[in-house]
Amino acid sequence: MLKDLFGKKKKYASIPGENAKKDVPEGLMQKCGGCKKIFYQKELIKNLNVCPECGHHHQISAYDRIHILFDEGSFEEWDKDLLSQNPLQFPQYEEKLEKDRIKTGLNEAVVTGEGKIHESRTAIAIMDSRFRMGSMGSVVGEKIARAIERAREEKMPIIIFTASGGARMQEGILSLMQMAKTSIAIQRLHRENGLFISVMTNPTTGGVSASFASIGDYHFAEPGALIGFAGRRIIEQTIREKLPKDFQTAEFQLKHGQVDKVIPRGEMRDTLGTILDIHGFGGETVESSAGV
Amino acid sequence: MNQVLEFEKPVIELREKIEELKAMTKDSDIDLSDEISKMEERLAKLENDIYGKLKPWDRVQIARHANRPTTLQYIEQLFTNFIEFHGDRLFGDDAAMVAGIAKYKGKPVTIIGHQRGENTKENLKRNFGMAHPEGYRKALRHMKQAEKFNRPIITFIDTKGAYPGKAAEERGQSEAIARNLMEMAGIKVPIICVVIGEGGSGGALGIGVGDRIHMLENSTYSVISPEGAAALLWKDSGQAEKAAKSLRITAPDLKELDVIDEVIPEPLGGAHRDMVTQALSISKVLDKSLRELEEENETSLLEKRWEKYKQIGEVQSSIEKVEV
Ligand SMILES: [Zn+2]
């Protein structure tokens, strides 16, 4: 069934972010996860969900991120129609999926597509941790692999924003194998000198951290993001030692050589635009290929 | 002394009883041969009942058996002229991962595998087969070398998982595993992976991307340990038995899910009961895989490797299918 779907292209136009903004009622308050100060939610949203006081980066939806990153109206979504099944007949999985679909308005934990950043055309995959903690099952793996393949075929760069607790338990071994699938797709891209920028946001752990997220040409991270392989609690239990507070943060990974640069959300669009330009993707108007 | 697993106790008890009766007849004039042969019949039936219908949790127990043969033991049985090499050239040598070269049926091969200890003392040295980044990087170094000298790679997977430790994180456990997944996709020689014990998540996959993936009948391969899953799902790691079933982690499960190529049969009761026979049945499959893969050129090898993983997973489109 997968083979039938692979290669088929369905395009969607959408203007992400705007609706979410309008929906926020006046006077709604939100406590900062960093300094614990109370802010008007509108004020936080205006500041890209980053605390104006302490710089704490709050969670942001995939569509809001698209809105922040791309030239207006340039984003086109891919494979929005792909839905998860319950291949193992895992108890309560379908109910959980349905709940998250309603809660987030998303079909799955990743949004893929293409758009333009400062006129540079790029493929993109953005994970959304509100959907099953951003975990990677068959659909997430498939959408990401397809986006990478399409970037390779159309000689586009690809940027992937990760936000994931790792492989999705409810799809068992099939989830684990998505690590291989996505990593092989990245290998195929690198083989043809394709550009892959990995941007790790909070959290990037487990099977996502240990696959495509860690094999980019550039590794960026949002300030304070949790990035690591194993969970803190498991490590503490294993080594019988309390871990330092900054363990597995973006800054920790920078210090340990795993991340090229920590980039605040407000600077992300410009930095990515510059990198795309330096790699020769800037400014030119590339015709969107209609398909193979 | 062989560790006795809970589910096989009736078999072991009956077997012991038969041994006792046999010993008695030796020392006396009483003829118990009728009883003994009856009991032996019963034993055969019981063995069939128990070992023939192993539940997922039984297989987990066998996969974790203290006497289950390890990578180095299989290497000794299967290959000649094995030489082990050490170190990742970056940080150190990880004893939880072994790598080396040998001959298989007269032809050179590179062998890589997780290595558990055969006793407590060795397990401490080997970190119970749970590798650090340097283990994965050592493995990769040898895969690259195999590619350079054009010899096939055989990996043995046998780990609870990559080590969840502080130093492992500091040295980039994620990157080490991720790099292996990516690089294994592009290695231009055949890669055959055999899960011989526990295939624990990313730590197993870190040497597990290849052209053929086989599993011993009682080995397991899972995204999370049954205990871990039970703790997450029901806040009770005691429900691991239930989780083992739901997660579908046995070799027959993975075969059914189209993730692996072959289930390699084990001797009755598990590989530890007869390692020599076990090695022979591994060899049969290995030989077949190597012969098949010899036929491929570099391009078709890599293309088929990608196709193999590309098709794994289950997705459904919400819109009507359009035939391409
Ligand atoms: Zn704050």
Image (cartoon, coloured by chain):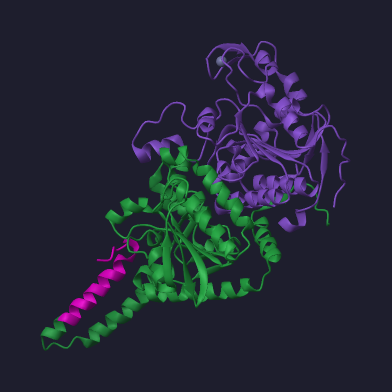
Which x, y percent locates residue B109?
51, 68
On screen, residue B216 versus residue B296, left or right, reads left
Residue A194 in view, yes or no: yes
Q: Where does the magenta region start and end?
A: B1-23
**Magenta region includes residue B3:** yes
Q: Quadrant of the N terminus of chain B?
A: bottom left
Q: Position of residue B255 (x, y in %)?
A: 56, 64
Q: How far from the left and from the top, in percent, is residue A176?
A: 56, 50
Looking at the image, is A226 positioned above or below residue A179?
above
Residue shown at 87% from the left, 39% from the top = A286
Q: Colour of chain A?
A: purple
Q: Colour of chain B?
A: green
Residue at left 61%, top 59%? B187
- Tell me which corner region of the image, top left, top right, bottom left or bottom right, holds residue B114: bottom left
Residue B127 spot, x, y in % from top left? 36, 50
Residue B21 occupies which quadrant of the picture? bottom left
Query: In the rendered image, which quarter contains the C terminus of chain B?
Result: bottom right
